[in-house]
Image (cartoon, rainbow, N blue to C red):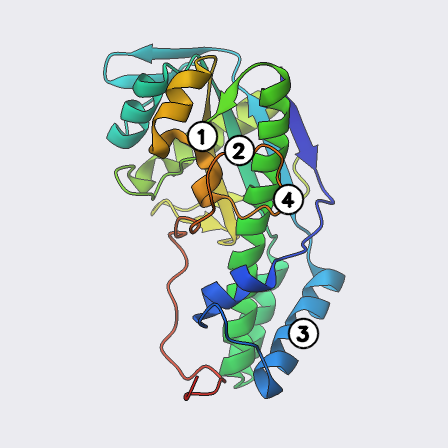
Amino acid sequence: MLELFDTHPGCQVQESEYKRLLGYPRRKVLEGRAREIADATRRWYAEHGRPWIYARQAEAFELAGEEIKINGAAFSPPPLLAQFNTAQVHTALLLAVSAGPQCEEKARALWQEGKPDEYFFMEMFGSAVVEHLVTVANGRICAWADQQGLAALPHYSPGYSGWNVSDQPQLWDLIRRVSGRDFPGELDVMDTGMLRPKKSLLAVIGLTRHLDRARSFAKLVPCENCSWPRCQYRRAPYRQAPPQIEAARPKHNVPYDQTM
């Protein structure tokens, strides 16, 4: 049974992913003030950020009609049900990652100081850290699954298309219950289903023994949503990570060359 707990996963966010979240074209090179703010943001988070990853295989799993039952908790998002039934999933992993509260606290302080550009870069870096943590976790899970003769499906989270964010509290309760451990930082779910710290993510990952079925359906291959470079388990080219439900961008000028 897999259990992954890492309180020092590192945060080597790829430049390309950071630029994507900032809204820059792929080939744009950050220069001038934008480069200065981006580098300062990285340095600040490297010193003050406290990211962590937790994943654990469910002890009990059942596909029961229109429900997915994980350790007694029932979920029924249609896209996840369709994915699990198509791949004939036989067990699942529960995943939680967080960039910690430090990033959003710093971003809030920057906004209050009248520094909207620095605020925006810090906000987007926090989102990039979450995507990076998910990528790191997926890489380790894929490596473990390959050794077990299994295939890991793409992660899916409350708030993604077809899965109501209101399931977030139940999923977090389930993760805490199966973990039986203290996490390195507080993570709460508000009544709206939003996470606090908001730079966090909860997800479910299906595992199947039927590698042929996973490989036959493009949507069952997690590689298109995984930006991990040099992955020896890659089966499809990376396209783009799914959006996070908290990644709403403020409307203000971003410091870059408008003629790019």
Please tell me the numbered disc located at residue 39: 3
Q: Nearer the viewer, residue 100 or 209?
A: 209
The residue carrying mark 1 is 204
In this view, 102 is above or below 65: below
Measured from the top left, where is residue 147 in percent x and y?
64, 18
Q: In the image, which disc is placed on residue 230?
A: 4
Q: Earlier in the sequence, mark 1 or mark 2?
A: 2
Q: Residue at the spot x=42%, y=17% of the render?
A: 212
Q: Reading the chain from its start, which is encountered first: label 3 or label 4?
A: 3
Among the two numbered marks 4 and 2 on one chain, the one whose residue lies closer to the N terminus? 2
Three-letter residue code for mark 3? Asp
Give the mark toward the camera: 3 or 4. Answer: 4
Q: Is residue 59 visible?
A: yes
Real-space CA distance between mark 4 and mark 1, rounded to the nearest whole angstrom: 24 Å
Q: Quadrant of residue 143?
A: top right
Camera-side residue of 104 and 24: 24
Binning the other alpha carbons within 10 Å of mark 3 as few (below 14), some (14 to 19) or many (20 upward) gives few
State if disc 2 and disc 4 touch (CB < 8 Å).
no
Question: Considering the image in quadrants, where does the C terminus appear?
Answer: bottom left
Q: Is there a contact, CB below 8 Å, between mark 1 and mark 2?
A: yes
Position of 34 with respect to 81 (left or right) is right
Residue 160 vertical position relative to residue 74 in the rendered view, above or below: below
Q: Which residue lies at the image location 65% right of the left edge and 49% below the top edge?
A: 51
| Badge 3 or badge 2: first in the primary sequence | 3
The local secondary structure at tag 1 comes to strand
Disc nearer the start of the sequence (4/1):
1
Residue density around tag 2, few if under 14, some if 14–19, many if 20 or more, within 10 Å? many
Residue type at numbered disc 4: Arg
Which residue is painted at 45% across and 44% down in the image?
Answer: 225
**Would you name the residue on which mark 2 appears?**
95
Measured in 3D between alpha carbons, the distance from the residue under mark 4 to the one under mark 2, in whole angstroms, is 23 Å
